[in-house]
Amino acid sequence: MALKVEQYEDCLEELKKKHRNLNLMIGNGFSIAYDHEIFSYNALQTFIFELKDPVLDELFRIARSKNLEVIMQQLRVVSELLKAFGDTSDLTQRVEEADSKLRKGLIDAVKVLHPEHVFKVSDENIAACKDFLNPFLEGYGGVFTTNYDILLYWVLMRGECKNAIDGFGYERENPEETNPDEFLYSSALTWGPNMSSQNIHYLHGALHLFDTGIDVEKEQYDGSGYILEHIEERMDREEYPLFVTAGDGDDKLSQIVHNQYLSYCYDQLKSACGSLIVFGFQFGEYDHHIIEAINEAAHHGRGAAEKLFSVYIGVYSDKDADYVRSIAHNFKCKVRLFDSSSVKLWGKK
């Protein structure tokens, strides 16, 4: 029997009646729903193509593809082959430089294509998105995102979502001190102080997160400038955001497990329990690491109270629905479909 497409509110109401833990995973469709012209994958590609960089132009010509993930994967394979065959020329270095240039172009594109600052997002948009997020922040579930942009961060900040905890805070610099009046705190927001209650997880990193080699730090709005201004200042110092920009799923997973923050977020997805609602994420050919995490959460060896019972996947069209039906057998938990257009995400625009 084919999976039918249901209404989002009906699915949410059913899960609430069952008293299920509610988890949310969002992909690029979350941002596209806000503005499809600046947050679409095509917009990122167009930005990079219009750089008119001769190295990147040659890459696109040789690869005969405009898919950035495919090109990154091909570069990785070429680099590994050259190393395996003991390349003694400068070719390996040139391939790695091209790969680095493509990654930097992607980061620049995400930064430039944002709205100028958080206050460009209307109060109505913020309020509507906050209402959408609240059911996943009020209980014992969590929010997982694969997006690089900072729209979610902006909503949580402007919406004053008190239940949203991303794990970051100010580290005590004199932990032996017992007098609260004498406590000294770091000037940077670092990941760790609030990780035990964390319910916001950036699975692939994000534009406002930076790995210093010792800590993972979060940029924030303050009296000296907007978040994007601080990010640009860091990039001018050749500091780059924590991004998973690898080619295929194995490469993405490799980057994730080698970073303490990303690895922790991925482990939290693997241990999610209750039900997972997926909005704006396509489960493409390079996303099998996400399906593997969901399946680990649904593993039959886990106790009933710790198990992920179902995943609800949002679709926009019959084509989307047919695709999810074709891959439903890859999931080890119940799969349900809902109409993404029935979600009141950003309010009237």
Image: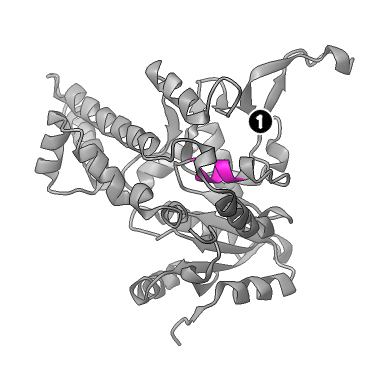
Q: Secondary structure at mark 1?
A: loop
What residue did someone put label 1 on? 192
Amino acid type at image mark 1: Gly
Residue 182 is drawn in which quadrant?
Answer: top right
Give the extent of the magenta segment: 150-155
Q: Nearer the viewer, residue 33 or 256?
A: 33
Q: Does residue 98 lie above or below 128 as drawn? A: above
Q: Residue pushed farthest right?
A: 179
Image-based side of 297 in relation to 331, left or right: right
Q: Position of residue 226 (x, y in %)?
A: 52, 28
| Quarter of the image where the N terminus is located | bottom left
Residue 214 is drawn in which quadrant?
Answer: top right
**Residue at 13%, 36% in the rendered image:** 57
- The local crowd at label 1, few if under 14, some if 14 to 19, many if 20 or more residues have their Cα within 10 Å, is some
Q: Position of residue 320 (x, y in %)?
A: 37, 70
Is residue 73 in view from this perspective? no
**Residue at 70%, 22% in the rendered image:** 171
Q: Nearer the viewer, residue 270 or 170?
A: 170
**In the image, residue 152 lies in the stretch drawn in magenta:** yes
Q: What secondary structure prevails in the magenta region?
A: helix
**In the image, residue 336 lies in the stretch drawn in magenta:** no
**Residue at 58%, 54% in the rendered image:** 124
Q: Position of residue 285 (x, y in %)?
A: 33, 57
Tell me how the rendering is colored.
one colour
